[in-house]
């Protein structure tokens, strides 16, 4: 019985190790530190008086957003129930400063060069967020430039992560 268990264990180790050869891996990125995904943008939203429109203490805050991706030429509501933020956004309090920002998951993926993500606020106003992704990054997806309603708001080299402020 002990010999049978030893043989089965050795067979399992052999079968598992066959699938772990470098030849079986699609992307060399895994061997260079992993796959990087930078596919969101942070938006600080204020009114003309400088009030934070995402702060829960603000009576005039914006409470509801909808994120849309374009699929087959049509705007489709982003809704993925198994994600931590199934509606494609998250309202986050900035760690160092006293304001909130909207983290929006932008459309994109491996091999995608440019996308447009639509953001609808509770009053029905729709804004377009365009993103251009870096090319030749292997399996990684890294944003390079972000436009808000056709105005360039962020580019690689301007801060560590895509973030900007808009006035509503």
Image (cartoon, helix red, strand yellow):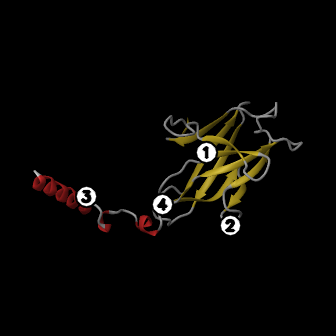
Mark 3 Cα-neighbour bin, 10 Å: few <14, some 14–19, many ≥20: few
Of tags 2 and 1, the one toward the viewer is 2
At 72% from the left edge and 56% from the top edge, which residue is drawn? 152
Compare marks 3 and 1 and give the one earlier in the sequence.
3
Label 2 to label 1: alpha-carbon separation: 22 Å
Compare marks 3 and 4 and give the one earlier in the sequence.
3
Q: Which residue is mark 4?
A: 35
Q: Is residue 30 above or below residue 49?
A: below
> CB atoms at circles 4 and 1 under 8 Å apart?
no
Q: Which residue is mark 3?
A: 16
Q: Position of residue 143 (x, y in %)?
A: 59, 58
Q: Which residue is mark 1?
A: 117
Q: Position of residue 37 (x, y in %)?
A: 53, 56
Mark 2 Cα-neighbour bin, 10 Å: few <14, some 14–19, many ≥20: few
Q: Which residue is mark 2?
A: 157
Q: Is residue 160 above or below residue 165?
A: below
Q: Which of these two is toward me, 11 or 121?
A: 11
Q: Which structural element holds mark 4? A: loop
Compare marks 4 and 1 and give the one earlier in the sequence.
4
Q: Is residue 107 above or below residue 156?
A: above
Compare marks 4 and 2 and give the one earlier in the sequence.
4
């Amino acid at each position: 019985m002990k010999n049978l268990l030893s043989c089965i264990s050795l067979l399992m180790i052999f079968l598992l190790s066959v699938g772990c050869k470098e030849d079986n891996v699609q992307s060399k990125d895994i061997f260079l530190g992993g796959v990087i995904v930078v596919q969101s943008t942070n938006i600080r939203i204020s009114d003309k008086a400088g009030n934070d429109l995402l702060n829960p203490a603000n009576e005039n805050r914006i409470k509801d957003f909808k994120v849309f991706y374009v699929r087959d030429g049509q705007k489709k509501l982003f809704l993925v129930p198994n994600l931590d933020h199934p509606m494609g956004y998250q309202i986050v309090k900035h760690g160092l400063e006293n304001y909130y920002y909207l983290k929006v998951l932008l459309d994109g993926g491996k091999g995608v060069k440019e996308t447009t993500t639509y953001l609808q606020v509770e009053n029905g106003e729709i804004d377009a967020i365009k993103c251009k992704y870096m090319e030749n990054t292997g399996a990684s997806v890294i944003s390079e430039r972000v436009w808000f309603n056709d105005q360039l708001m962020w580019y690689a080299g301007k801060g560590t992560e895509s973030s900007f402020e808009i006035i509503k």
